[in-house]
Image (tube, rainbow, N blue to C red):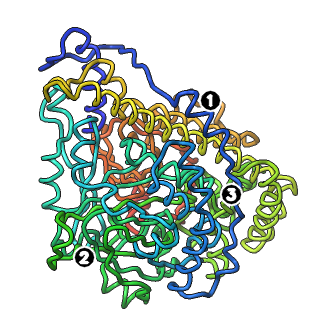
Amino acid sequence: MSKKSFAVCALLALIVACQHSFRVTGFTIPRQVPVRFRTASAPFRSRADAFDRSIPQSASLATEGITSSSLGQVVLQKMESSRDKALEFADMFALTPAEAAFYSLFAAIREAVPLGLKGQPFVLRHAEIEKAMHQESQWPGFFTMKDLEKALSDDFLDAARGSTDNRKGWQITDVSVPRGQSFEEARMTFQDVQAALEKGTVIFNAAGAHIPKLAGPSLACTESTLLPCALNLYVTDAGKRTSAPPHTDKQDVAVVQTSGRKHWKVYSPPNPAMKPTVDIFARGKGDDSLPLYILESDLGCQLLLETTLNPGDVMFVPAAFPHTTSTVTEDDSTHADKTSIHLTLGIDHHIWELDYLCCRRLALRRANVKDTALGQTGEEDSPYIGAANEVTAPLINDLFAELPLGLLGGVDYAAPVIEHVAAELERISREVDETTASAVGASVWREAVERLRTQGMELLDIHRDMYLAALEEGQIRDEEAAMTAHLGQAVRRAMTPERMQRLSLFRVKRYFDQIDASKKALQQWSYARVEPEGEGDLADNWALTMPVKVGDQVEADLGGAFFPATVSRASGGTFDVNFFDGDRETGLERNQIKLLAPPAPQGDINTSNMTPKQLKRWKKQQEKTK
């Protein structure tokens, strides 16, 4: 059993054990344990429903071709013009001026900044942001090591540690493993994090959902972009020559430095055609090495930006732009805490497949048209590898382009956006392959866009509720702290049954389950008109029971929720998988892995997306079956 799954079981058991005693040293796992999940209260949800989210639609075309520094100035101007709206947002949710500034930042990005392959990096300095907002931004010190220590004390959190070898792909390992079966032995401690920092950067994924203090910025990003967004937290000791080796990400991210200092290098994207079997949005992760000498010499990527971020500074890095980091070692007496902490707030188009490439695949499935050009009809095919990387550069830019941020807005606001996206989707699809596109009914293009918009709005609501629930939990904890301030530390930190059920591990899982259900509903909709031969004979649980092989695109259990992954090892009834961000999970059982589609008949296996090693292994398997 994986460490994360073990922790889930341990905590579920502890809830029952705590009903009898607050001093639990060991327990057995019961068959069934009722768990109450907390969601956002009605007052919080009504505030979210009442908030006016209409802001100017993206004007990215007006900024194309301008320099990085001038783009930063445009963003600052847009931040200033959105200040009143940001303060209204903060006032409605009882947030701080710092969180209002997060809203302004992403409102400006939504209105003015090109994203993805058409984007460019830029930096905003702390003093410039304060001038634009006409107030102290409060981002220096917004989240510190003291805040992290408190978060770990209050909750049951999980984290990963990134590798520091800049000659290899970025590898991710767990920060801690359970030391026993009691609550205190199972959860990660501040001391575990400090020990991990000696070896590399510590990463808290989806920290805005788990840590109440980071829920405000996450909500601000989500509300201002009208897109389900996520916040990750990165912690690095000073003096690390490489805190993250060169890699790319699926998200367009705004990096906000809150403590310490970090040095960054950002490069232009590599040509996908030079290595088409690798996801351009996950270069330098897992088994894909992207050392600087390859990046600069072999791939010809240009250094676009090199800078050091100080507390309160912001940097924007578009999706697919390689970057590497180190921590500054020179003494800076103005910052007592040398540990670097930064927040990355991601605009997650590609995470939720809100781009033209994925929308095209959805339309072809819905129309029951085989994708002979790119080979991406099946759910098991990764959209970002294979033939899609071998079309012309302008077509790659169009295919991988994000759908407009206004798509998930209100009906009146989104109507012209839907028309534009449907027309653009058909145009791009015809450029890929006229024959395939002509086989798709004229109404299907718009139908696919509208269905993808429906799912996007579902995900948007789920993320809003998740962050509102975290904010409410933060208020409850503050009230509890005030009421117990006169008591001893042991009493204040006692993990009562009621507090146990409010841990983020349980609170967040409910929303992850809703996300899984939404994704499954979209998949079922896309295949509604498809009747593969023999599929009617499949068992209801085929996704959890049919054979899985190395290289399969699957969804794997990561802490109780399922996320996209690739099978890297299959032996003895257990499996290892690689997640898109480089994280690995080992020793998974078959019921912890979901196939995305039934295995293709042997003669219909698509080999275009296989790596040379996978293709060689597959050919050997075919020879054995002859």
Q: Nearer the viewer, residue 461 or 312?
A: 312
Q: Pick whichever of labels 3 and 2 is earlier in the sequence.
A: 2
> Mark 2 sits on what residue?
167
The residue shown at (56%, 39%) is: 462
Q: Nearer the viewer, residue 460 or 30?
A: 460
Q: Pick whichever of labels 1 and 3 is earlier in the sequence.
A: 3
Helix or strand or loop: what does disc 2 sit on?
loop
> Mark 3 sits on what residue?
359
Q: Pick whichever of labels 1 and 2 is earlier in the sequence.
A: 2
Mark 1 or 2, closer to the camera? 2
As measured in the structure, the alpha-carbon distance from the residue carrying label 1 to the one carrying label 2 is 48 Å
Q: Name the spot of residue 460 as percent of width and height, x first.
A: 60, 45
Question: What crowding class fits label 3: few (fewer than 14 Cα within 10 Å), some (14-19), or many (20 or more)?
Answer: many
**Kind of residue sitting beneath label 3:** Cys
As measured in the structure, the alpha-carbon distance from the residue carrying label 3 to the one carrying label 2 is 36 Å
Helix or strand or loop: what does disc 1 sit on?
helix
**Rendering quarter of residue 142:** bottom left
Mark 1 or 3, closer to the camera? 3
Contact (Cβ within 8 Å) of mark 1 with mark 2: no
Q: Which mark is residue 537?
A: 1
**Kind of residue sitting beneath label 2:** Arg
**Kind of residue sitting beneath label 1:** Asp
Question: What crowding class fits label 1: few (fewer than 14 Cα within 10 Å), some (14-19), or many (20 or more)?
Answer: few
Question: What crowding class fits label 2: few (fewer than 14 Cα within 10 Å), some (14-19), or many (20 or more)?
Answer: some
The residue shown at (45%, 50%) is: 96
